[in-house]
Amino acid sequence: MDVNGENLRFIMGFKLKQYRLENGLSLKELGEKTDLSISYLSEIEKGKKYPKPEKILQLAQALGVSFDELVSLQVNKDLDPLPVIFSSPVIKEFPFRMFGVSPQDLLALITGDPAKAGAFIRTLLEIGQDYDMRVEHLLLAALRSYQQMNQNYFGDIEDAAEGFLREMRWPPEPPLDSALIANFLQEKFHYRFDEETLSGYPELEDARSVLVEGAAPRLLIRKDLQPEQKKFILAREIGYRHLNLKERSLSSAWMNVASFDQIVNDFKASYFAGALLMNRELL
């Protein structure tokens, strides 16, 4: 199990609620036994706060368990969904917040009925294993849902592209000259362009472009692409820079999906590129 501050708070909250329920105590009754407020106890159970040692001791005494039992990372069999959640890369990487689900909601689901929740979570993970479903598959599915939730329209990105065109005093009517885009990247961010190197790496045959980061970024572009495809790649680089998207793919082919933020940022940069090259007022 990964151990960090957030996980420690969740485990403490999880165990506190279980011990409280086993003792048949309400939050009010536990508060009276420990001289701690109901709101404070509720915050602990939700995984939002971690009590100080002296308060942990008060809680342990009121619940009839030892200090070590309450702070231990070990959980009994009924609570075993917790390690599953904290150790599964699928659960850790999936963007629950985007769908209005917080870690506290997951915690509430598990503490409500640990046995059923554990069976549900393990079933999901087993389905993923049976179908060779990796984290990338779920994240890409989440991206599609994110696009559908917004009806695949992102006005703020289109506004940013329109503002960029005005700022640069580039003509709004397509087609936008590739030389303008390339010169901007060279002058503003010291980009260098290389159309020869990629052909020498068969393992990168699916990649249309690869960015080699550095003080002078080197953008490797496949030589046999159509001019419009090359222009889009350049425009997407402006998207990353102008929208200040730090977490991103370095290749046009998703060879390594690190997080949902990376996938969303890649999409935003591509959307920006499309908006830059196709004026919405002319559609």
Image (cartoon, rainbow, N blue to C red):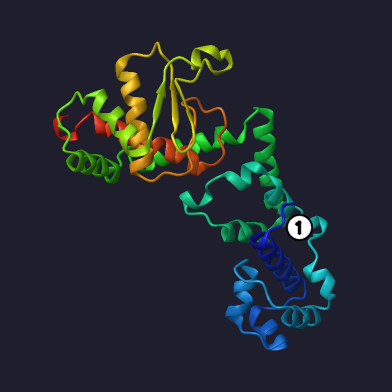
Which residue is drawn at the image coordinates 37% and 38% (left, top)?
A: 189
Please state the horizontal and vertical placement of residue 229, each as a whole percent of the image: 34, 19
Type of amino acid at the residue the image marks with label 1: Leu
Does the image show residue 145? no
| Quarter of the view holding residue 24 | bottom right
| Quarter of the view holding residue 182 | top left
Please state the horizontal and vertical placement of residue 73, each as a whole percent of the image: 78, 61
| Quarter of the view holding residue 66 | bottom right
Vertical order, 52 against 85 (above or below): below
Vertical order, 107 against 216 (above or below): below
* Secondary element type, mark 1: helix
Which residue is identified by label 1? 79
| Crowd band around label 1 with a 10 angstrom C-alpha radius: few (<14), some (14–19), many (20+) | many
Which residue is drawn at the image coordinates 31% and 35% (left, top)?
A: 187
Does the image show residue 44? yes
Please state the horizontal and vertical placement of residue 1, each as a whole percent of the image: 75, 51
Vertical order, 267 against 41 (above or below): above
Residue 160 is left or right of residue 281, and the answer is right
- For the residue pair 241 and 131, the one nearer the viewer reads as 241
